[in-house]
Image: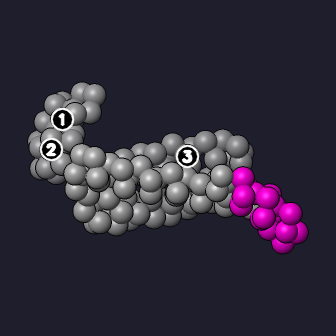
């Protein structure tokens, strides 16, 4: 309902246009996320710290965005734009994963729950990250 209502309001405004649909999607997902988190907190007593749940991922996203932007800008002068986009996206994925690890967003028990988590944790412990 949120998406439909915001689409009907925002898209017809000439200054906003199709960008209103993107904004409506973000608002819709934000509402769904809020409902899901609220339900989880009530049902299973989910305890999420603001730092781990919001601040650290935002820092990782900012680092990723800056690195991918500058890698794209640098590569555009050297190779074709489409290839520069693909490479910048791959760099973004790698940088985000490294930032999440460096910021210790996941606990040891959460890492163990991942596929090959035991092996990943052993490598991280060997590197003295965890």
Q: Residue furthest top?
A: 116
Residue 52 location, quadrant: bottom left
**Distance of label 1 from label 2 (alpha carbons):** 6 Å
> What residue is disc 1 on?
112
How would you rate the neighbour count of disc 2 (Cα within 10 Å): few for under 14, some for 14-19, many for 20 or more?
Answer: some
Based on the picture, tell me whether residue 15 belongs to the magenta stretch. Answer: yes
Q: For this rendering, which residue is in front, 87 or 120?
A: 120
How would you rate the neighbour count of disc 1 (Cα within 10 Å): few for under 14, some for 14-19, many for 20 or more?
Answer: some
Of badges 2 and 3, nearer the viewer stands 2
Relative placement, left or right, of 11 versus 53 is: right
Q: Secondary structure at mark 3?
A: helix
> What residue is disc 2 on?
108
**Distance of label 1 from label 3 (alpha carbons):** 27 Å
> What residue is disc 3 on?
89
Q: Which residues are magenta?
A: 4-19
Question: Are the two marked residues, 2 and 3, in contact with CB atoms closer than 8 angstroms?
Answer: no
């Amino acid at each position: 309902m949120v998406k439909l209502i915001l689409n009907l309001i925002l898209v017809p405004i000439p200054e906003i246009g199709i960008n209103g649909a993107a904004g409506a999607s973000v608002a819709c997902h934000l509402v769904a996320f809020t409902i899901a988190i609220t339900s989880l907190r009530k049902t299973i007593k989910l305890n999420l710290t603001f730092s781990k749940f919001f601040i650290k991922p935002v820092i990782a996203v900012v680092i990723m965005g800056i690195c991918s932007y500058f890698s794209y800008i640098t590569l555009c002068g050297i190779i074709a734009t489409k290839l520069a986009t693909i490479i910048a996206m791959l760099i973004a994925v790698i940088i985000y994963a490294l930032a999440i690890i460096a910021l210790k967003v996941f606990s040891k028990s959460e890492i163990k729950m991942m596929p090959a988590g035991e092996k990943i944790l052993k490598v991280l412990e060997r590197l003295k990250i965890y």
